[in-house]
Amino acid sequence: MNISIVVAQEEHYKYSQEICETIELSALLRGTGIAKRTPEYIQKKMETRDAMIALIDGKFAGFCYIESWQHGKFVAHSGLIVHPDFRNLGLAKKIKSKVFDYSLEKYPDAKVFGITTGLAVMKINSDLGYKPVPFSELTTDPSFWNGCQTCTNFEILKSKENKMCLCTGMLYDPKEKVKDPPKHPFNVKVLNRLKKIKEALFLKK
């Protein structure tokens, strides 16, 4: 099995439709909210070298892209996905680690953040040195929050004025980086309990 994780570019345009379909299908199967993206948007990320793609024996296996906000003050990793045929290989962590290192190289002064409902993604972020933070520490750029409009939980976010949702905010500040950055302990039970509390509060009928 030949695994290749590289910066996506024009030669990878042919995978853009499959990437979008994989992202949407994954959200439907998990019943979680995720912002939809178009093939044209994915291709734009490839054109500007703001994406990573994983290929296994020439087949699409995974993807993640970078978005920058507030003139490069913040960057986020979005659309992290692994094709169903290549799951349980640790590929998500490999892709995330690659795009994380690439982000620090391309945007050295930016704070790296993300919002997610997935415990697996939280675990990966925690291992990279992210810490859970309130939404107030994330970008205030309305374009970022507008990107959540296709998420099934957008009305919750809107009702809370972009201050809270089912997602957990996580942040990595390179200014706090040391040679061996301390990892923030990841407690699955605590975060799962927090997720259930949010669901009980926000999704109650």
Image (tube, grey):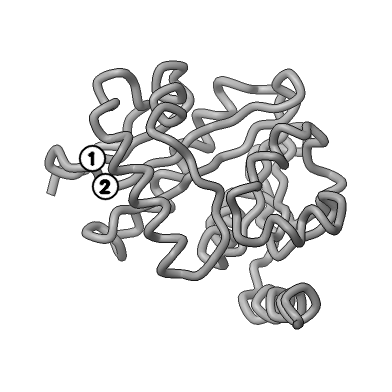
Upstream in the sequence, badge 1 or badge 2?
A: 1
Residue 55's label in the rendered image is 1
The image position of residue 57, as x and y in percent, is 12, 42
Q: Is residue 177 above or below residue 194?
A: above
Question: Image quadrant for the C terminus?
Answer: bottom right
Is residue 134 left or right of 88 when viewed as pictured?
right
Q: Is residue 116 above or below residue 66?
A: below
- Amino acid under disc 2: Ala
Is residue 141 left or right of 189 when viewed as pictured?
right
* Along the viewing direction, whichever of 134 and 180 lies nearer the viewer: 134
Q: Answer yes or no: do the residues labelled 1 and 2 have beta carbons within 8 Å?
A: yes
Is residue 41 left or right of 4 when viewed as pictured?
right
Q: Is residue 68 above or below residue 86?
A: above
Q: Secondary structure at mark 2?
A: strand
* Along the viewing direction, whichever of 189 and 155 lies nearer the viewer: 155
Residue at x 46% of width, y 29% of height: 41
Q: Is residue 54 above or below residue 25?
A: above
- Amino acid under disc 1: Leu
Residue at mark 2: 61
The image position of residue 122, as x and y in percent, is 59, 60
